[in-house]
Image (cartoon, grey):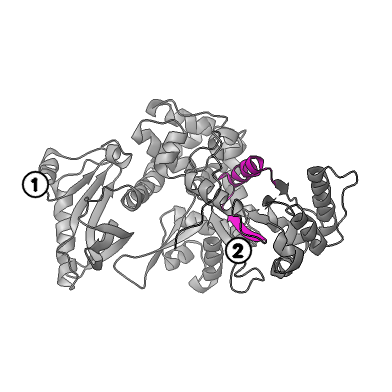
Amino acid sequence: MARPSHRHIPKPPQIFDRDWEWNELTAFVSDEEPGPRLGVVSGRRRRGKSFLLEALTKATGGFYFTAVEATAAESLRLIGEAIGRFTDAPVPPRPRDWSEAMELLFDLAAQRPVTIVIDEFPYLVRGDASLPSRLQATLGVRGGRHLRRHPRLLLCGSAMSFMGGLLSGTSPLYGRAGLDLVVHSLGYREAASFWNIDDPRLAVLTHAVVGGTPAYRREFVGDDVPAGLDDFDDWVCRTVLNPARPLQGEAEFLLAAEPDVRDRALYHSLLAAVAAGNHTSGGIASAVGRKATDTSQPLTVLKRCGLLTVEPDAFRGNRSAYRIAEPLITFHHAVVRPNQSLLTQRRNPAAAWATSRDTFLSKVVGPHFEHLCREWVSRHAEPDTFGGLPIEVASGAVVDTAARTSHEVEVVVRGAVGQDHGILLSIGEAKWNKIMDVRHLDRLRHILGLLAARGIDTSHARPACYSGVGFSPELHAAAERGEVVLVDLRRLYGGG
């Protein structure tokens, strides 16, 4: 069934990228169907949700309200005053409860579809837990004047654990939303463009610190962009390691902003354990001196908050790897936190960086490069790279029983070849700071042999080498013969 046509609303030029998000939002608010519609917009802080929604309300002549941490009575007064300003009322309305407030909001759309945005919605629910139920009751009235009104209500929030449950099966709003949009960080290629960085090596280093969060460039470092590779160390010292810049304390704030996080010391220790290279639940628990049963729930909370991801092992179904979702948090726990006294008491970022640079390259940039390689396969690999359509991209470990060891594989690609799905298309090794040679190809061939011996179909599997510094002439020759796929930084960033 064809998607209904909607009024085209041009994206404002000040919005970088976000074409898909803008199209989804404008399609939602310009829908001419009668009756109220509910949408939810979420995403971690600093990703530009409010910027998008403010631009949307301006483009459509809509109503925008940002909640604050306040009592229910004060919040009702504030939203009444905002409605009064929007309608030019001589006296602002004073809703007694959220049912009355919702009626007033819906009245704004009596004549035409009106975009209504409530930003920081979790603050309102914290003040009055009955708000979702009251909103559900208002949306549930389908007859009479409710059907003749056209509110396009968008609820926005950054508390990911709360927003993730807002439309769940146990929520009063379950089944009521026509839009559930998560605003993610910019992809690594888009982030490089946003920071105006053309050098792919510098782009990887910068992305390993600040990721793809737009606000970190403008608001947090005042458009201070590393001028080149020679400037990167100084840039780190004058921005993320500078106690006078808000970027240094941002990782602490990301955790503090989540209402489900109670024992903050434990949560910081869990994140530090993952940043140090512990990726299994047992390894994380051991690193923080707790039993795995004691850390299971906190790890679940961090996952629900969007601060951790859990990636299944490509070859062992009963094993998963925890990874930090926000690069700045990894940087904080690998570099900032261990040097807190140097940074805050002695205010010596250069000394802190001198002691931590090697750790940054091994514990932060190396794993981050592996992640970017997997993202490249998922989003940017040319259609014929692996001889099939990539569907699942992961990492994993292959046990070598004879050698009594296991082999880590950083990039495992499964996909579709014709009508067959789940076919192993590639296994790959990623090295950030090492020129790769035929020994790496031989290792991948050995791993493919181990997999074939286990009964896995490897007939379509192509070995792949991913390097941040390049490949030996012999490996290039093997690639020319079609024996291996080579991905360098230029290819990673779309330079051919």
First in residue order: circle 2 vs circle 1:
2
Which quarter of the figure has residue 480?
top left
Residue 464 percent across, percent down from the top left = 21, 51
| Residue 68 in the figure: left or right of residue 342 | right
Residue 193 magenta-highlighted: no
Q: Distance between the residues labelled 2 and 1?
A: 53 Å
Q: Residue 435 at what x, y percent from top left?
A: 22, 40
| Residue drawn where x is 79% and y is 60% of the image | 103
Range shown magenta: 36-62
Residue 9, position as x, y percentages in the image: 56, 42
Could one spot residue 334 in this view of the protein? no
> Relative to 268, is 434 above or below?
above
Task: List the residue tagged with mark 2.
Answer: 177
Q: Nearer the viewer, residue 222 or 52?
A: 52
* Badge number at residue 481: 1
Horizontal side of 490 relative to 161 (left or right) equals left
Tell whether position 51 is magenta.
yes
Q: Is mark 1 on a helix, strand or loop?
A: loop
Q: Which of the 4 quarters of the picture holds residue 265?
A: bottom right
At a point 43% along the width and 68% down the height, the residue shown is 282
Looking at this view, is 111 or 135 the one in front? Answer: 111
Could you tell me the amino acid type at mark 2? Ala
